[in-house]
Every structure is written in structure tokens, then in C-alpha cells.
Amino acid sequence: MSHLFHPYTPFSAIQAGNFPHIVRGEGIYLFDDQGNRYVDVVSSWWACSLGHNHPKIVQAIQQQAGILQHSITGGMTHPTVIELAETLSHLMPTPDRHVVFASDGASAVEAALKIAVQYWYNIGRPEKKALIGMDQGYHGDSLGALGVGFVDHFHEPYSEIITHTAKLPFPQPTPTDPNGFEPSRTIITAHANHLAAIILEPLCLGSAGMKMYPADYLKQLAECCKENEVLLIVDEIAMGFGRTGERFAHNHAGIDPDLVCIGKALTGGYMPLSACIIKDRLYDTFSNLGCRDGTFYHGNTYAGHPIGCAAALAALRIYEAENTVANTTEKAATMRDQMKPLEQRSCVKETRFLGMIGVVELHSQYADKMPHIKYALRQAGYLFRPLGTIIYLMPPLIISIDDLTKAINALADALPSE
Ligand SMILES: Cc1ncc(COP(=O)(O)O)c(C=O)c1O
């Protein structure tokens, strides 16, 4: 018996056993200890956008490991973290930014939430301390992240110790409110006096089941936040680095967020590294040079870890040099064209698409069929991870059109026939 406590894995699944023991990765494939090859259809929890074992990232990791393995960023610095902070700042709509590094998505979110609260404290408005997320939003599993998250099924045991001020409803467009924004406006204006920040997943709520909303909602939200003196934190941890067809999902809305959280595909999924990128307007208030100490007393041991930073720099160079994001346009169109007809199957409630995300949602009565569908796909060589009755493709961005087509065909074959 393994001593491993598997995350997000019910005991019934452990009891059923038969987990793949993955021993190697190559491109879009993972290989198990039995020699079986699987397509990593969900990019290993949405991180491995560039596939596995990319020689340039592996080389960057090896090289950095031979030079400097770790050095902290508290009161010290090193060349790799400096270069990465500068590169990331210049990927933002405006480059006047500083970057706080962390090791995983949740810890980048924690930093963002605390920076938002401390910013208002630093400028003498401590009453602005509330944080609001979106209904069904997900930002990680630490307690702070749960406070702005609303995938209730995950959070129920902790509900007594989590304080939710309010939540923005998931946008429901209507003829008079085409982006479904007006209910959010009502909440923001009602709470503006004590609201520090709003955090949300841009354009697609991943863990809620790839629920998508219009870019213009985000645009209206950014304007409303500005009007009401509320900071906007955009959580690009799942959607960043090309997943939605733009480098960042917020680029679709043409907005300039105050804080941006990134992780997962930042290193191509090769090292645990995340970051929160903040505007200098906020950063400048964290000074102790006046009469008050505004220092940010927050950090992680591995913040700015040299090997992680080297992996991220290598990944960022690949995204640019190989035109990874622009090259997804045709693949995304293929995915849509080939998956949309699945709507004609009686088991399918709807399909939806955004960049390199393709979703087939089955009717709720198929819930008990999901383990079987997942297993059939695995037998066919595809590692899917359905969310309830939602089956989605979020493959490495480098997947070929041919492999994409094969994956969609496998999915079509695995769906219930009636
Ligand atoms: C939007 C979003 N934010 C934050 C997180 C948390 O990231 P991590 O699992 O690296 O802590 C996730 C993870 O799926 C996510 O999708």
C-alpha cells in the first residue's frame, strides 16, 4: 500500500486502485510503468502547456542547478530572478510593475490578497479590507484563497472558519444587460466603502467546470472597480500563457489590472513557481522610509527560486520563439469544428470553447457513468479528468492538429450512445 495521501481523490477511487504509475513524459505523452502511452489531455493539471521533456527547459534547469540551486530574495537577489521579474513586468499591458514570487498558485493568490489589503492600510484607509470573488470561482486551497472561492462542494468542511463578505454572481447575459454585468455593479457599489479588491478568473472559471463569460464583462468590471476605488486582481494561474488564445485572458478585454496572479504554465509546468505582478502605484506604498513601516512582511522560502526562475525564463523564450500562442488559432478552430457536432448526441447538454479549451457537458443523469467514461478513455490512451459531468480538453498548446483530432474521436467514441 502506498503511503501517499492523494489530493482530490476519493477513497473509493483509491480502493478501486489501478492508478497509472507514470514514470516518464515526452511531448504530449505520459508513459506508465507498464509501457502504456497516454496523451496528457489536461496538460497535467493545466500546467504543461509546452509538453513534457522539452530539451530547452530541461537544459535550463540542469544548467541553473549546476550554478546556483537556491538563494533567498529577502534582502538579497540573484540574476535569474531579476531577469524574470523584468520580463514578466514587460508582458503586462503597462510595465511599471514589481513582482512577488511564490511557489504555487494558492500562495501567489495569498500574496495578492494581502497586498491589496495592505495597500489600503498603507495609504491610511484601513476600512477598505474586504475581498470579494465570483460565485463558483476558485483560487486555490489555502484558507485565504477559500475566502474568495465559491466551489462550495470543495469547501464545505471549512465553511465555519471562512468569512465571505459577498460574491459577484456568475454573469448571466440578458437582452438589456448583454454582458450580465449589472448585478455585479450593484454588489460593488454597495460594498465599495469597505472593499479592498475583487479577484476573479478571467473569462473562464476552470474548477467550476470551465464556465465561460464574455470579455466585455471583464471590461465593465475593470471600469466599475476604477470608478469605485476597488483594486482588481486577475487570477491568470489557469488561463495565462496562451490557453485562451491571447497571452493572458485579460488581453481579450484590453484591461490593465492592478494585480495579476500567474503560475502553472509560467514554467511550462516544469518547476513549482508562481508570482503576483503588481502595479508600482501599489508597490510604492510599501515603504518604511517615511514615518511608518509599510514593509510587506510576507514571503515563501522558495520565492524566486533560481531553478524555477531559470525554467520560467526558458519557457517564456519558447512561447516567443515558437510562436506558441499564435499557433493555437488554427488548432482552436479545429477543436471547435470537430467537437461542436457532439451537441447532436442525446447525452450532451452543451459544448463550449475558448482558445485551447474544449468542453463537452453531459446531462446530469450521466453522472454515474463518468468513472466508466474516464476509464474507457484511459484504456484508449487518453488521460482525461472530468469535472462532474463535464469532460474537457485542455491539451498542451503544442499538440498537433492530427493528435487533437484523434483525441476528439476517442472522446466521441467513449460517450454513451444513448
Ligand atoms: C484559477 C486558479 N487559481 C489558483 C489555483 C491554485 O493553484 P495551485 O494548485 O498551484 O495552488 C488554481 C488551480 O487550479 C486555479 O485554477
Image (cartoon, rainbow, N blue to C red):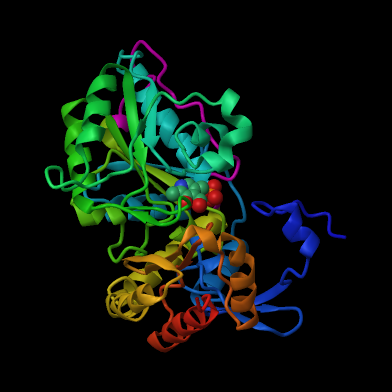
Q: Position of residue 12 (x, y in %)?
A: 75, 56
Q: Position of residue 405 (x, y in %)?
A: 42, 85
Q: Residue at x 28, y 36 (%)?
A: 280
- Whether the magenta-drawn stretch holds residue 234 is answered as no
Viewer-proximal residue, 168 or 44? 168
Q: Is residue 150 visible?
A: yes
Image quarter of residue 246: bottom left
Task: Tell which residue pokes out farthest to the top in this image.
Answer: 291
| Position of residue 398 in the picture relative to residue 177 (left or right) | right
* Span shown in magenta: 282-305
Q: Position of residue 407 (x, y in %)?
A: 48, 81
- Whether the magenta-drawn stretch holds residue 302 is answered as yes
Q: Vertically, is 218 above or below 74?
A: below
Q: Residue at x 32, y 63 (%)?
A: 244
Q: Residue at x 56, y 60 (%)?
A: 367
Task: Tell which residue pokes out farthest to the left in this image.
Answer: 176
> Chief secondary structure of the magenta span?
loop
Viewer-proximal residue, 195 or 277? 195
| Position of residue 118 in the picture relative to residue 107 (left or right) | left
Q: Vertically, is 416 above or below 166?
A: below
Task: Tell which residue pokes out farthest to the right in this image.
Answer: 1
Image quarter of residue 384: bottom right
Q: Position of residue 13 (x, y in %)?
A: 73, 60
Image quarter of residue 233: top left
| Position of residue 338 in the picture relative to residue 20 (left or right) | left
Viewer-proximal residue, 314 or 141? 141
Viewer-proximal residue, 63 or 407? 407
Total tally of numbered discs in the picture: 0
Q: Vertically, is 202 above or below 412?
A: above
